[in-house]
Amino acid sequence: MNEKIAVVYWCDTTGHAARSIPIASELEKRGYDVEMAGGGFGEVFANLNGFELPDLTDLTVAPDGGGSLVLHTLRHTIPRGVKRLKDLFGWLGEEDPDKVVTDDILCVFACAVTGRKFYRIENWNAKMYSFPLKQLYGFYDWFTLRYGEKIVMTSLWPEEDAPEGRARAGPLAQVGDEEVEPYDVLLMPGSWDNEFDDIRKRLEDQGYDTKMVGADDWETKAAMTPETSAASVVLCSGFSSIADSVVGGTHTVVWPNLFLQKGIARGIEDRDIEGIETVWSYDEAVEALERCLESPCETPDFGSGASEFVDHVTGQDS
């Protein structure tokens, strides 16, 4: 009987599903029985990759339209979080997986309470936070290592040593085989738009061929690497978008918005990684794109870290 492994991603924003799908696909490729769950924004991508998900309660941490975070937390996040936790207890009990791979904090808690073997997906670390989040995140790491098997960190520097209880893997991206005609610029704004619409208009006014994820003319893709590979240069902000871009082998301009994205950007700057650069303003972003369009910039050399990640989960890294 094949070992059953559950892959459960956090439901708020699509990046959590984007990094979980390559793991689930690699596990299936190796013959494991895989059950995937998560819901929320990433469900459409899971479905496009052949995964049918259970009906778990989803939630968002930040309010839409800039409303009150406190009211949103009290009226939405907490009550729906309690329902999602109940759903997870029920689903895990029904599926009874041998192992769980997750970046869902509620799933981590459910696994710890029920004594299930679990591995946590991570691309942040406590050092990227300030008080009090640094201390809270440090406690989350301690809790994971106390009750779980390992924290597997996906990053752009997988060759570096990992602290005790942790392991490293390369950037997680779903590699696709769709044929895409070459074009100039792919804009990947993520959930928070850093004036990407204005940049797209400016580039198109200069005659460049552009695409923008989430725009009215954008068609949802099962895998992003064919699109990133076909572009001459990519502008993005979030880590999953960076992963899709560098695995696609395309020069990547990172314009962070959220403070965690800024932590990753500073890590890139500290390491001077070939084929990736960081910008911190609208003007810097436009200058970087125009420079790479006028004269091709260096490209990154990364494969997807899914195989390496799964090695850590299945014990094939020893």
Image (cartoon, rainbow, N blue to C red):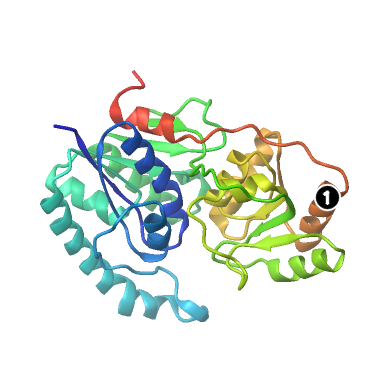
Q: Quadrant of residue 126?
A: top left
- Compared across the picture, whether 46 is left or right of 208 comes to left
The secondary element bearing badge 1 is classed as: helix
Residue drawn at x 82%, y 41% is: 296
User: In the image, what residue occupies the spot 44% across and 76% down?
Assistant: 63
Relative to 174, is 138 on the left or the right?
A: left
Residue 119 screen position, x and y as percent:
30, 39
Residue drawn 17% across the image and 56% down it: 91
Q: Quadrant of the N terminus?
A: top left
Q: Position of residue 90 (x, y in %)?
A: 13, 58
Amino acid at circle 1: Leu
Q: Which residue is mark 1?
A: 293
Horizontal arrangement in the rendering, residue 86 relative to residue 22 (left or right): left
The residue at the far top in this view is 318
Pick the quarter of the image with the C terminus: top left
Residue 195 showing in the rendered view: no
Q: Is residue 113 visible?
A: yes
Q: Nearer the viewer, residue 125 or 307?
A: 307
Residue nearer the viewer, 102 or 144: 102
Up the image or down, 259 lies above or below 111; here it is: below
Q: Residue at position x 62%, y 70% from top?
A: 217
Q: Is 145 situated above or below 65?
A: above
Residue 151 image point, x, y percent: 36, 37
The answer to whether 257 appears left or right of 172 in the picture is: right
The percent coordinates of residue 241 (x first, y second) are: 57, 51
